[in-house]
Image (spheres, rainbow, N blue to C red):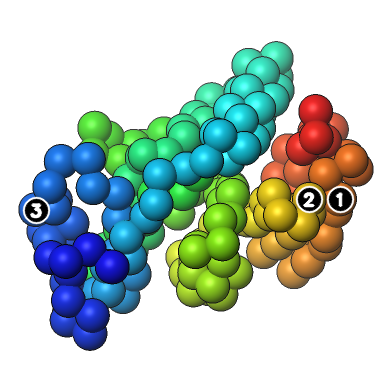
Amino acid sequence: MDAAIEEGKFYTIEDIYALPDGTRAELIDGQIYSMAPPSWTHQRISMNLSNAISSYIKNMQGDCQVLAAPFAVFLNDDDETYLEPDISIICDVSKLDEKGCHGAPDWVIEIVSPSSKPRDYIKKMLLYHNAGVREYWIVDPEKNMVSVYGFEADLVEQYHFSEAVPVEIFENLSIKVED
């Protein structure tokens, strides 16, 4: 944990903005979680997924925005939670401003690293569900698996990277992570 961050202390978004430039961290329920720099595999998956989703939206002449980290998501109207999902898809562009997304993205994708697994699989999943995210993917490069949580349809599915993963919120879109 960063030396300036005290475990058990309650923090706000103001504290996130006061961190030294270049420090990556998220704020969940008043607790700051430092974030390690992403690996090459992480970045490759992020870029490939972002490109596939962006291409689909462009081909469908959609208005949704695909934004990759670092990009702030303020899920709730409070100063206790600040997230930087790996990929956020926002279809209501009125939620967007220069600081980030205010409210729930329609679809969130987290690419887990060993240090982020407990947050991504438990804490963030509950936060995203409760805030109104429609679909949540957890991409696990160690397991070559994608866990899909379709919150609107109360759906939980798992797919191998070699399988086409259907996107619940977009008609006729499936993505193979290994591509």
Gap in Å between the C-alphas at discs 1 and 2?
Answer: 6 Å
Quadrant, the N terminus = bottom left
- Residue at 49 percent across and 69 percent down: it is 119
Query: Which kind of residue does numbered mark 1 sit on?
Result: His
Q: Which mark is residue 144?
A: 2
Q: Which mark is residue 18?
A: 3
Q: Secondary structure at mark 2?
A: loop
Tell which residue pokes out farthest to the right in this image. Answer: 163
Query: Which kind of residue does numbered mark 3 sit on?
Result: Ala
The image quarter containing residue 148 is bottom right
Q: Which mark is residue 37?
A: none
Residue 20 falls left or right of residue 85: left
The percent position of residue 62, horizontal first and vertical second, equals: 61, 23
Query: Which kind of residue does numbered mark 2 sit on?
Result: Asn
Which of these two is toward me, 125 or 47? 47
The percent position of residue 59, horizontal first and vertical second, equals: 70, 14
Residue 123 falls left or right of residue 149: left
Question: Do the residues under discs 3 and 2 have CB atoms within 8 angstroms?
Answer: no
Characterize the local packing of mark 1: few (<14), some (14-19) or many (20 or more) Cα atoms within 10 angstroms: some
The percent position of residue 128, horizontal first and vertical second, equals: 51, 63
- Residue topped by disc 1: 160
Q: Secondary structure at mark 1?
A: strand
- In this view of the protein, can residue 51 be seen by the observer? yes
Gap in Å between the C-alphas at discs 1 and 3?
Answer: 40 Å
Question: Do the residues under discs 1 and 2 have CB atoms within 8 angstroms?
Answer: yes
Q: Secondary structure at mark 3?
A: helix
- Residue at 85 percent across and 53 percent down: it is 159
Q: Earlier in the sequence, mark 3 or mark 2?
A: 3
- Residue at 37 percent across and 39 percent down: it is 70
The image quarter containing residue 22 is top left
Gap in Å between the C-alphas at discs 3 and 2?
Answer: 37 Å
